[in-house]
Image: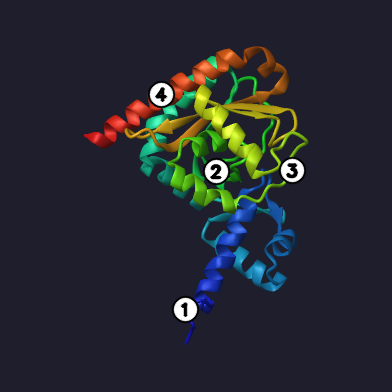
Amino acid sequence: MTDGKTPKNGDKSFSKLFDIIEQIAQTRDGLKGNRIAALTGNPVSTTFRILKFMTDRNWLLNQDGRYTLGPGLVRLGALAQEQNPLQKCAHAFLTELADRTMETVHLAVLRGAEVCYLDKVEGRRSVRMASLIGSTAPVYCTGVGKAVLAYLPETERREIFPLIDFKSCTPSTLKNIEELKKDLALVRRRGYALDNCEHEPGVCCIAAPILSSDGCAVAGISVSGSELYFRTRKAELARLVRETADGISAAFSGRHSM
């Protein structure tokens, strides 16, 4: 018997499996088995047993001892994208925005005190960024996070504030809740959020919320790129991001009101 809090053995096994997938998904080139064991805290023997289980089913690929996501997960990811109505609605808008700005564009939703990236379109002048579809980032130091947070109902915003663990990603990162509240007030006044190299050094971001018919944020989009280009293009990029977010908001709200 369990007390309702302690995971059963099967639950623990599932947890280990998904922990391994998450660790691999956060990399660009995969991980060695011993490194996966160290990152997940699982015994080496258990880790390799789970890795074999997943490679046998094509969920992972083993390439010279380095494990990457396999065709099985790619297929599931493609199906997840097809089944996500917001992503289906927004993708063409994101592609057009990336073409017009030549910068990288993201679509993200809020998950507690983090944002989760649902889609990403690389720009022609893209800088190397850590973001991957399905990965998460802190809400307080990303443009898209602040854009969504600013347009939540006040009660929801207050529930998220205590969950935020302020850590300095760069020298520009906001340091406390009071700084964040002032920033969010600016976001609401101008209609877009800024990330002035707060999450990644040398990378700036301009973001705007995707709003439901009642004016509350359901997601956000952002344009990200080199600080050098953003210095002279802030007004132009802010206008394009807001126009695109408004277009997605209207299209998505229209679909769900039918």
| Residue ID for mark 3 | 168
- The residue under label 4 is 246
Kindly identify which residue carries mark 2: 115
Looking at marks 1 and 4 on the same chain, the residue that comes earlier in the sequence is marked by: 1
Give percent across and percent down for residue 84: 39, 42
Could you classify mark 1 by the number of other residues whose Cα lies within 10 Å: few (under 14), some (14-19), or many (20 or more)?
A: few
Residue reaching furthest to the left: 258
Foreground mark, 1 or 3? 3
Asked which secondary structure carries label 2, the reply is strand
User: Tag 3, which secondary structure?
Assistant: loop
Residue drawn at the location 24% of the way across and 35% of the way down: 257
Which amino acid is tagged 3? Answer: Ser
Taking the image as shown, residue 175 lies to the left or right of residue 84, namely right
Q: How far separated are the C-alphas under marks 1 and 4?
A: 45 Å
Measured as percent of width and height from the top left, residue 216 is found at 40, 36
Q: Using the image, determine if residue 155 lies above or below residue 5.
A: above
Can you see residue 107? no
**How far is mark 4 from mark 2, CA to CA?**
20 Å
